[in-house]
Image: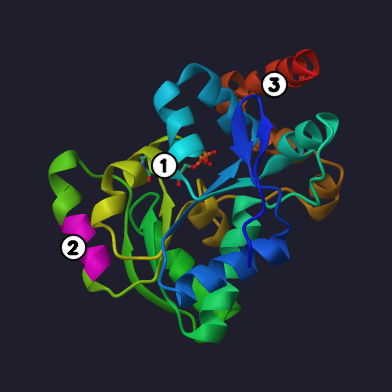
Amino acid sequence: MEKIAAIQVLDVPVHPYSMNDAVAYLDQKIQAQQPSFVVTANAEIIMMCQDDAEYKNILTNIADLVLPDGAGTVWAGRKLGHHVPERVAGFDLFNRLLNLAAGKSYKVFFFGAAPGIAEAAREKAEILYPGVDVVGCRDGYFSDCDNTAIIEAINNSGAQILFLALGAPKQEKWLQAHLRELKPYITMGIGGSFDVLAGKMERAPLWMQKYSLEWLFRLYKQPRRCIRMLALPKFVIKVICSK
Ligand code: UDP
């Protein structure tokens, strides 16, 4: 499958894949035993890149696939005149890849979130996707001196897919720093997805997702996010001005 060219949203590349095409692309990567570092870029991430050159460099030059997560990124791509078929939310892609892994016997590793959460997410994954082989779990609270042991555990597990839940930009920066040492083909930051799968955090109801109001739900559930969310109106203004 030929790779779809990236569009630029505020100088950050975004590959406008549909969910099905993204899953098919990543499946091919595993079969070809080639690496793919995946970022699901919402408006907050694109705004972080405006002030963080290291993060922007990761999305521009190091990530293989930057997908349009969040209503904001899809809106921006379309506003700038590009064809963006749909939103590819990190949590949804995580679930689709678990389903793929269960069907094709790909091994997966869960790294991140508070102690016990990755294990609880694994239990839920085993119920939702029978046969899924989660070969290892590790919480996301560690110091630099643990890195060698963590990488060894991931590599020795034989995982082909690594899901990393440390939040953005920490997860992408950790992956970038260790990409060359890691054996899994697919490496993907998934933010709070283990918390959601484990049932520790609720996801917005479907109607809110449909009407692009997931951000409002997250703000209601986690009011401490309000400072971070100020990035959203700034993002809208910046996109309109960049037209
Ligand atoms: N986390 C972690 N290690 C850290 C900081 C955060 O494992 O040092 C986890 C945290 O427990 C949570 C996730 O990273 O499960 C961050 O979730 P959030 O929804 O904030 O992700 P974001 O919106 O930043 O992608």
Binning the other alpha carbons within 10 Å of mark 2 as few (below 14), some (14 to 19) or many (20 upward) gives few
Q: Nearer the viewer, residue 93 or 186?
A: 186
User: Is 48 rendered above or below residue 121?
Assistant: above
Q: Which residue is pictured at 37% across the width and 49% down the height?
A: 114
* SS state under label 1: helix
- With 117 as the anchor, is 139 left or right in this view? left
| Residue indicated by mark 1 | 172
Instruction: Give the amino acid at mark 3.
Output: Phe
Q: Is residue 18 magenta?
A: no
* SS state under label 3: helix
User: Is 53 rendered above or below residue 15?
Assistant: above
Binning the other alpha carbons within 10 Å of mark 1 as few (below 14), some (14 to 19) or many (20 upward) gives many
Instruction: Give the amino acid at mark 1.
Output: Glu
Q: Earlier in the sequence, mark 1 or mark 2?
A: 2
Q: Quadrant of residue 230?
A: top right
Instruction: Give the amino acid at mark 2.
Output: Glu
Ligand 1 falls in quadrant? top left
User: Is 9 rendered above or below residue 132?
Assistant: above
Residue 235 badge: 3
Q: Which residue is pictured at 62% across the width and 22% down the height?
A: 226
Residues under numbered marks 1 and 3 in contact, where contact means CB atoms less than 8 Å apart:
no
Q: Is residue 90 visible?
A: yes
Find the magenta span and give its range: 149-155
Residues under numbered marks 2 and 3 in contact, where contact means CB atoms less than 8 Å apart:
no
Q: Which residue is the extreme one toward the front?
A: 2
Image x and y of residue 152, in percent: 18, 62
Q: CA distance from mark 2 to mark 3?
A: 39 Å
**Main secondary structure along the magenta-highlighted residues:** helix
| Residue indicated by mark 2 | 152
Q: Nearer the viewer, residue 137 or 219?
A: 137
